[in-house]
Amino acid sequence: MKKLFGVIGDPIAHSMSPVMHNDAFAQLDIDGAYHPFHVKADDLAAAVHGMKAIGVEGFNVTIPHKAAIIPLLDHVDPLARAIGAVNTVVRENGSWTGYNTDGAGFVRGLQEAYGGPLEEKRVLVIGAGGAARAIYYTLASEKVSRIDIANRTLEKAASLAESCPYPITGAVLTTEEAEKQLGEYDIIIQTTSIGMSPLIEECPVSMENVKQGAFVSDIIYNPLETKLLNEAKKRGARIQSGLKMFVYQGALAFEKWTGTAPDIHRMEEIVLQQLGGKYVNN
Ligand code: NAP
């Protein structure tokens, strides 16, 4: 019988996950199907129980359900619980287990492009929302020893850093402070929604002081080169868009569901074809 998968969110119409996963099923000759499901917040519990009842094997979770789904699951992976967000649910022995592959997906893409150990690097995270939390905690779980964090709302950055369950040091900075000392960082990770289409002329932090050869990663992938990345590139930084994070979070979910690693390069091509300048959020 065909194995069923999907993604739940609100909105969901522009999700690129279905085309990416369905292509991977076809490539690997797996009899699976992945559907987008538009689920409103009030219907979340019914949707989660209903999917178990009809035999869905696993699903992704996107805005606005990543935190709200946690109490509805049977088990939650410790890192996902610490992050406070689940983006991947897997049926394990008839129960729902929640994972977070966003942080691991980002770190996989960073490791691939950076090409060296991250542990002793000076790292700055810009932003303190859900994606920042996933990235910060996953980097800390991977033994990165110092991460500074800057955000418009300082209290949110302080609370994110204080709640980190892994050993880590680092300063909490205003965006102005981060701009001044930008030249100290080897790796800068932009996680706010600033710069995303249609507001492509906006930039959360000026890249004026970025050091030559620094690695600047923006988790936005629409556009692929944000204003922040463009400014960093002009000053000699190496840059990376959010496409790798998106593709790797999907690939890691796929692997959890099927036990098989999909072709990451093909997944990336499929998403690139789909992008075409449209607004997307998962
Ligand atoms: P979120 O939880 O809503 O956090 C938003 C962040 O952006 C906060 O730090 C917020 O600062 C900041 N922000 C929002 N408006 C701002 C403004 N006008 N000026 C300055 N800062 C502002 O969102 P999220 O889930 O973390 O997602 C953030 C971005 O990452 C989105 O663009 C999303 O599409 C992208 N994303 C990409 C991937 C991927 O796979 N590549 C995965 C997840 C998310 P305050 O705390 O001050 O409000």
Image: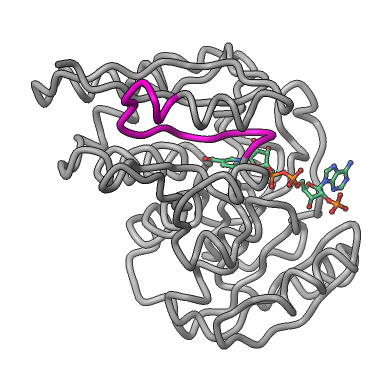
Give the image location of residue 87, x and y in percent: 51, 43
> Does the magenta-highlighted stretch encompass residue 43?
no
In the rendered image of this protein, does residue 116 appear above or below residue 94? below
What residue is at 65 percent from the left and 47 percent from the top? 67
Image quarter in which the N terminus is found:
top left
In the rendered image of this protein, does residue 185 appear above or below residue 152? below
Tell me the magenta residue range. Answer: 51-65
> Would you say 129 lies left or right of 21 here?
right
What residue is at 82 percent from the left and 74 percent from the top? 158
What residue is at 11 percent from the left and 26 percent from the top? 28
In the rendered image of this protein, does residue 225 appear above or below residue 187? above
Ligand 1 is found in the corner quadrant, namely: top right
Quarter location, residue 194: top right
> Would you say 21 lies left or right of 89 here?
left
Q: Nearer the viewer, residue 265 or 256?
A: 256
Q: Nearer the viewer, residue 267 or 85?
A: 85
Q: Nearer the viewer, residue 82 or 230?
A: 82
Q: Nearer the viewer, residue 179 or 92?
A: 92
